[in-house]
């Protein structure tokens, strides 16, 4: 199975900060990666698909980049509603695998 | 509006069985692969199972292989997960999901809580 390693596992940031989360794959996965946001008590929602395509309805402050084994999710200016846990998901090879998550909380 | 609504969760004793259902609406159910993803309390997301649009091919995670069975009824727009030989490690929120992959269509249900305890 492909292992997905996210870093950091948690971070504290302030409103307006630029935030970057990294996901590394144990082998190359082309651009077959998505990013999800999950708020407490809620189901996840996808933000980014195909590594860099913005999901419909998602604010443009979210962006994704990368290919192969290293990927990043960037929030250009953190907003109060962005405090949540973020997961990457690779869909290059079955079983599809998630990263362990990055919790973003208020500094 | 796209909806995936899970039902059938609850408390079950170790070694017991449970069947989850997921009623879909708002999209052409028979055209899409579907998935089950679970999340243990305070933990991350875990792919459990996938079924193709026509129901002919399935895939399960190693941790549930031989115990869990995914199926679907395209005439009823319903996805199922039959869970047997349940153990405490199976306690989790189970999400019915259309994982989009490279496709823009990605949608999650609200989840069904399964608790395995004596």
Image (cartoon, rainbow, N blue to C red):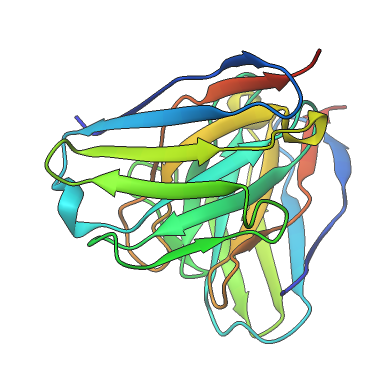
Indicate the position of residue A92 as horizontal and vertical percent values: 54, 77
Picture quarter containing residue B78? top left
Picture quarter containing residue A64? bottom right
Q: Quadrant of the C terminus of chain B?
A: top right
Whether residue A61 can be seen here: no
Reply above or below: A45 against B70. above
**Between B118 and A69, the one nearer to me in the picture:** B118
Residue in the image at 67% along x and 87% along y: A28
Reply above or below: B22 against B118. below
Reply above or below: A93 against A48. below
Q: Quadrant of the N terminus of chain B?
A: top left
Residue in the image at 29% along x and 46% along y: B72
Residue in the image at 87% along x and 41% along y: A10
**Between B17 and A54, the one nearer to me in the picture:** B17
Indicate the position of residue B61 as horizontal and vertical percent values: 64, 59
Reply above or below: A73 against A59. below
Q: Is residue A62 left or right of residue A49?
A: right
Whether residue B105 can be seen here: yes
Q: Is residue A7 left or right of residue B112?
A: right
Indicate the position of residue A3 as horizontal and vertical percent values: 77, 70
Residue in the image at 79% along x and 37% along y: A103
């Amino acid at each position: 199975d492909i292992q997905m390693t996210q870093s950091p596992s948690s971070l504290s940031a302030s409103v307006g900060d630029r935030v970057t989360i990294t996901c590394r794959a144990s082998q190359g996965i082309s651009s077959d990666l998505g990013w999800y946001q999950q708020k407490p008590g809620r189901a996840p929602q996808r933000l980014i698909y195909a590594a860099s395509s913005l999901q419909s309805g998602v604010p443009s402050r979210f962006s994704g980049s990368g290919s192969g084994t290293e990927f990043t999710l960037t929030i250009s200016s953190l907003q109060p509603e962005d405090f949540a846990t973020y997961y990457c998901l690779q869909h290059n090879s079955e079983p599809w695998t998630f990263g362990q998550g990055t919790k973003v909380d208020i500094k | 509006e796209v909806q995936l609504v899970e039902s059938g969760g609850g408390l079950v004793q170790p070694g017991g069985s449970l069947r989850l259902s997921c009623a879909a609406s708002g999209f052409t159910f028979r055209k899409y692969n579907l998935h089950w993803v679970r999340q243990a309390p305070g933990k991350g997301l875990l792919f459990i199972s996938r079924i193709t649009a026509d129901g002919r091919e399935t895939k399960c995670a190693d941790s549930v292989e031989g115990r869990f069975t995914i199926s679907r009824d395209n005439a009823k727009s319903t996805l199922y997960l039959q869970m047997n030989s349940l153990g405490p490690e199976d306690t989790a929120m189970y999400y019915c999901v259309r994982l989009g992959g490279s496709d823009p269509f990605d949608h999650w249900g609200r989840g069904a809580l399964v608790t395995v305890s004596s």
